[in-house]
Image: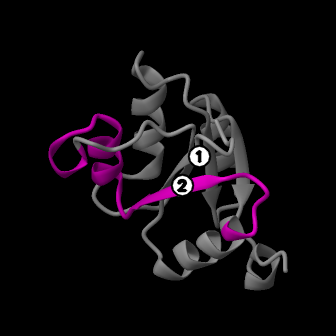
Amino acid sequence: MGTLDMPFQILLVEDNPGDVELIQRALRNSTYHNYLSVVGDGEEAMAFLHREAAYSESPRPDVILLDLNLPKKDGREVLVEVKADEGLQDIPVVVLTTSRTQQDILAAYGARANSYVSKPADAKVYDST
C-alpha cells in the first residue's frame, strides 16, 4: 500500500471535471506513489467496486474519495451500500464534498464514513506547490 512496488489505489467518485483535475494535481505532488481511478457517478462507482462490465479488471481501492452530490446514484447511497457490503466495508471512505451542513456531516458519519472533508472554495488549497 503506497510503496515503491505497489501504488496506493485511490477511487475518486466525482462528477465535476474541475474538481477531478484539482484532485489529480494535488495527488501528483503526493509523497506516496498512488494510482487514481475516477468514476463520474454512483452507479459507476458500484460497478467499479464490484468489478462489473467495463470494470472487470479494476483494482481494489485502498481508499474511496466520495462526493455526496452525484448523478444516477447519490453519494449517500453509495456510502451506505459500501459499508453494508462485507466485501467492501473495510475500505476507508472519505466524503469529499461542498456540503458543510450539520445534517450531511452527521448522516455521513452515521453511515460509517471514515472522514468528512469539505471541498475548499479556493482551488489554490489543492495545489501544494
- Foreground residue among 58 and 114: 58
Q: Secondary structure at mark 1?
A: loop
Indicate the position of residue 100 as horizontal and vertical percent values: 72, 60
Region of the chain picked out in magenta, as a range: 28-55
- Categorize mark 2 by other alpha carbons within 10 Å: few (<14), some (14-19), many (20+): some
- Foreground residue among 76 and 7: 7
Badges 1 and 2: C-beta atoms under 8 Å apart? yes
> Residue 37 lies in magenta, yes or no?
yes
- Foreground residue among 26 and 94: 26
Indicate the position of residue 126 as horizontal and vertical percent values: 75, 74
Q: How is the image coloured?
A: one colour
On-image quarter of the C terminus: bottom right
Q: Is residue 85 above or below residue 92?
A: above
Q: What is the three-letter code of the residue carrying label 1?
A: Pro
Q: Is residue 127 above or below residue 30?
A: below
Q: Which mark is residue 35?
A: 2
- Categorize mark 1 by other alpha carbons within 10 Å: few (<14), some (14-19), many (20+): some
Reading the chain from its start, which is encountered first: label 1 or label 2? Answer: 1
Rendered residue at 63%/69% (across/down): 23
Quarter of the figure with residue 22: bottom right
Q: What is the three-letter code of the residue carrying label 2?
A: Tyr
Quarter of the figure with residue 101: bottom right
Rendered residue at 43%/36% (across/down): 60
Furthest-left residue in view?
Answer: 53
The CA distance from mark 1 to mark 2 is 6 Å
Q: Secondary structure at mark 2?
A: strand
Q: Which mark is residue 7?
A: 1
Indicate the position of residue 26 as horizontal and vertical percent values: 71, 70
Rendered residue at 35%/59% (across/down): 41
Rendered residue at 39%/21% (across/down): 85
